[in-house]
Every structure is written in C-alpha cells, then in structure tokens.
Image: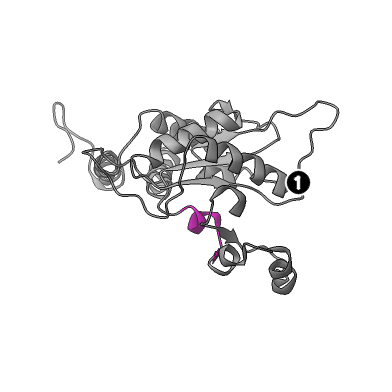
Amino acid sequence: MANFGLTDLRVVRGPEPIDAREAHNMAAGSRDILGAATWVDSVAEAVAGATRVMACTARPRRWKTWDVLDPKPACRVLADRASEGESVALMFGQEDHGLSQEDLAFATHLCSIPTSGSHSSLNLSQAVLLLGWEWSQVGGTPQRRGKARGGVVPLASIDTLNSAIDQIGDLLQHIGFFRRRPRPQTLAMLRHALLNTAITERDVQFLRGVVNKLTWWVYRAPPPSEGEGPP
C-alpha cells in the first residue's frame, strides 16, 4: 500500500486472531498505515460510504451479471469517480479462499488479474501491489469520504443501494416471486442493472419511497375497485 500511496486500510476481522507483533514487524516503513487501520466485523462496515467497490477475484462466478475488468480499466473506473469526490474502494479476500458470494454483494465491479494458465495463483500482497501500481498510474488518490464538486451529483453508496435491494427482495419474497427464481441471483441482477444507471442517493430514496408504497398496498390495502389505485 505504502509503495503506491494507498493509506486507508480497512480490515475485516476473521475467526482467527491477528498476531499484532508479527504484523508490526512485517510492516517495515509503513507502520503508520497499520496503526491507522480501521478494524471492523463485516464487509458491510468496511465498504460503508463507498460508491464504487472493485472486488478482486480469480475464480469464475456462477452468476456473472457484470463484466470482469483487467487491473488498468478497473483502476480507471475508480479514479474517474474519485476525481469527482466520490469514495471508492478496492476489496481483496483472504489469502486461502478469496471472496465469497456474500462478499460480492457489496461490490459494484469485478477485477481479475490475467495470469498464465499453467500457474494462476497470486498471493494477497502480490495482488495488492499490482492494483496499487495501476492505481498510481491513473493518478488515483483514495479518499475515505467523498464530497461532490463542481455540481457533480454523488452516486449512491453501496450500503445504501444494498439496503434498498434487500427491501425490494423482501417484497418480492412476500408475493412469491422467488418460487422459480433464486433470490441471490435475482437480486444480483437487479443490483447490476441499477449500478449501470449511475444511480444517486436521491434516486435510491425515491425508489425506496415507491417500494414503501407498494409494500403498504400488498400488506395492508384491500383489493382495489376498478379504476382505483393505492392511496
């Protein structure tokens, strides 16, 4: 991280404790980054406030609802949004098994590092180094909190968007929509469709207002008379 100007480290605690002394010894020349790291209990907390989250993964996914980017275009996507004051993030999984399907619910894009077919394995530090290099080449400067500048409307954060999608999922669950369609796959496709629209916080609030009204109608309203609609 320190090699290429990345300073905002957020670590999701795992089931095994971290050896703080070993980590400190290995962070030669960059102990300030380790000392300022934010430790959280979930991926949701780690990416809270971000509008673009690039998840780095090597494994094919069962439901590929978005394109998988190479490192350079991946960092360009993030840098373009960061230059407008948005908060962006690179997300890496654990050394042994990477990111889970549940983790990817908090991603807006996927990145994969092309490697030789005969040996595709990269360790975590190698992946971070390569993405850090590409980030530095496009002039990116990670920001913990973004502020809109020059009249640019800020995009919706991934946690705000996921909350809205969960709300829609609960309503669809109630009306039996998932009897023949897996919920995770359906909501992943919905998430991708909304992200393609560059959806803003204001858009999400409007969408949730619509869903609230629909939910009220489905749960509480009597069947409408002809020509009538929900209040």
Identify the residue shown where x is 52% and y is 35%. 75
Identify the residue shown where x is 57% and y is 42%. 104
Residue placed most toward the observer, 210 or 161: 161
* Residue 121 in the figure: left or right of residue 133: right
Identify the residue shown where x is 49% and y is 59%. 45
Which quarter shows the C terminus?
top left
Identify the residue shown where x is 39% and y is 38%. 81
Q: Is residue 42 magenta?
A: yes
Residue placed most toward the observer, 124 or 167: 124
Residue 61 coordinates in the image, percent (x, y): 65, 32
Visible residue check, residue 99:
no
Q: Secondary structure at mark 1?
A: loop
Residue designated by label 1: 123
State whether residue 34 is above or below residue 7.
below
Residue placed most toward the observer, 194 or 39: 39
Q: Amino acid at mark 1?
A: Asn
* Residue 32 in the figure: left or right of residue 76: right
Q: Is residue 3 magenta?
A: no
Residue placed most toward the observer, 60 or 56: 56
Q: Quadrant of residue 223?
A: top left
Residue situated furthest bottom in the rendering: 21
Write the start and end of the magenta stretch as one range: 37-47
Residue 118 coordinates in the image, percent (x, y): 86, 27
By what rule are the colours in the image chosen? one colour
Residue 153 coordinates in the image, percent (x, y): 26, 39
Residue 163 coordinates in the image, percent (x, y): 40, 49
Q: Quadrant of residue 170?
A: top left
* Residue 119 in the figure: left or right of residue 136: right
Please state the total of marks drawn on the protein image.
1
